[in-house]
Each structure stands twice: as structure tokens, then as C-alpha cells.
Image (cartoon, rainbow, N blue to C red):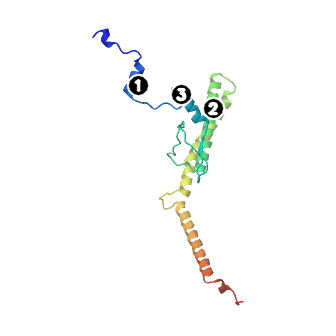
Amino acid sequence: MGTAERREAPGDDLGTRLKAQRGPEASDHDIPTDAREASVGQDTEQSTQYVVGADRVAEPVQSAYQPLWIEEPARRRRMPDPVRTSAVRAVIIIAVTLLLAMVAFFCTMAESWLAFPMVISAVVSTVVATWGALDIWVTRQVWNQRNGVVSIPSSTARTLRRERRQARRQARASERAQARIRRQGGNAGRLSHS
């Protein structure tokens, strides 16, 4: 094959050949491809159009703009408030403990007089941080025992549920009794018919 056979038509470059092979692509909404599309893109993004019908209030027309992200539902349920509070407290205590340990280390390396008090405070802070981490576990267990569905016979949640059910039954029974009294007539309570 000589060079004459491999010669291509003028204007046929690599980019157009690759586009032809790949097929049509979805254009990026933020980057216009030519001046005509740039003016159309500015018109649709800057002005919000409203459609008003005879029986409808003004509704905005959806543009071709796509948001940067899409909100997804949470995969896990939210932690109960007391557990989350103890977790935040523990994280703050652990962060302060790490900071104190780092300062103690650098003061020791620099042979500063501050090294001894910092080491003592780091040790005390480590004990407090351990308590904070255990507090998360204890708070979660207590919350589950009181409010959660725990299949243990000694669970307080069962007793609380049983009490709530009994209170609801009594409230319904009293409502039925009041309705029965009203249905029997307002005259039952009167002594004379005037």
C-alpha cells in the first residue's frame, strides 16, 4: 500500500472519525458546543417561564438543567438522640485527648518543663476518653432496653407497651360509655320535661 491509497479527503480529521464511530453523545449542559446553542442555553437557564392554565396556578416549566447531585435516602436509621449526644461528647473528648498526647510528646522531645504536667493531663484525659467510649455503648443499651424491641423477658419495653395498651383500651371504653350516654338521649339526665 502506498501513500496515495492512505490519503484521506480534506477536512476529514481524527475527531470527526471518532465521533462517527462512537455515535451521538449527550452534550454537557454547562459547556455550549457552538454560539447558537450558547444563546439558547442562556435563555433557558436565566429566565424561568411559567405556564398558567385556566384551572391551574402558575407552574414553572422544567428546564433541561440537571442538578449536581441527587438526594438519596439514608441507608441506616438515625441514631436515637441520647446515643448521638453521647457519641458527639465522646468524639470531642477523644480529639482533646489526642491533642494533649501530641503536645505532651512534643514537650517531652523539647525537654520543656511543661512535659510533666502535659503527660499527667494526657493520662487523665485517656481515662476520661475511655469512659466516653463506654458511655456510648451503655447509653445505646439503656435506650434499647427502654424503647427498643428487645426479645428478653425482663425488657422494660414490654411492660411500657402493655401499660400503654391498657391505657388506650380504658380511654376507648370511656369514650364508648360517653357516646352511649349521649345516644340514649339528653332527656335522661333531666328531672322534668319542660
Mark before the other along the chain sequence, 3 or 2? 3
**Sequence-wise first label, 1 or 2:** 1
In space, the residues marked 3 and 2 are separated at their CA atoms by 58 Å
Circle 3 SS class: helix
Label 1, label 2: how far apart the Cα atoms are: 56 Å
First of labels 1, 3 by sequence position: 1
Considering every residue shown, the one lying at the far left of the view is 1
Q: Position of residue 159 (x, y in %)?
A: 54, 64
Q: Quadrant of the C terminus?
A: bottom right
Mark 3: few/some/many CA within 10 Å (<14, 14-19, 20+) = few
User: Are discs 3 and 2 less than 8 Å apart at CB?
Assistant: no
Q: CA distance from mark 1 to mark 3?
A: 20 Å
Camera-nearest label, 1 or 3: 3
Q: Mark 2 falls on what kind of element?
A: helix
Q: Amino acid at mark 2?
A: Leu
Task: Specify few, some or many for label 1: CA neighbours under 10 Å numbering under 14, 14-19, or 20 or more.
Answer: few
Residue 98: quarter of image: top right
In percent of width and height, residue 61 lies at: 56, 43
Residue 141 as seen in the image, left or right of residue 120 = left
* Nearer to me, 183 or 159: 183
Can residue 131 be seen in the rendering of this structure? no
As helix, strand or loop, the secondary structure at mark 1 comes to helix
- Amino acid type, mark 1: Lys
Up/down of 177 relative to 109, above or below: below
Horizontal and vertical percent position of residue 83: 58, 48
Q: Which residue is mark 1?
A: 19
Residue assigned mark 2: 99
Front label number (3 vs 2) = 3
Q: Position of residue 58 (x, y in %)?
A: 61, 48
- From this viewpoint, which residue is outermost toward the front? 54
User: Which residue position is annotated with label 3?
Assistant: 36
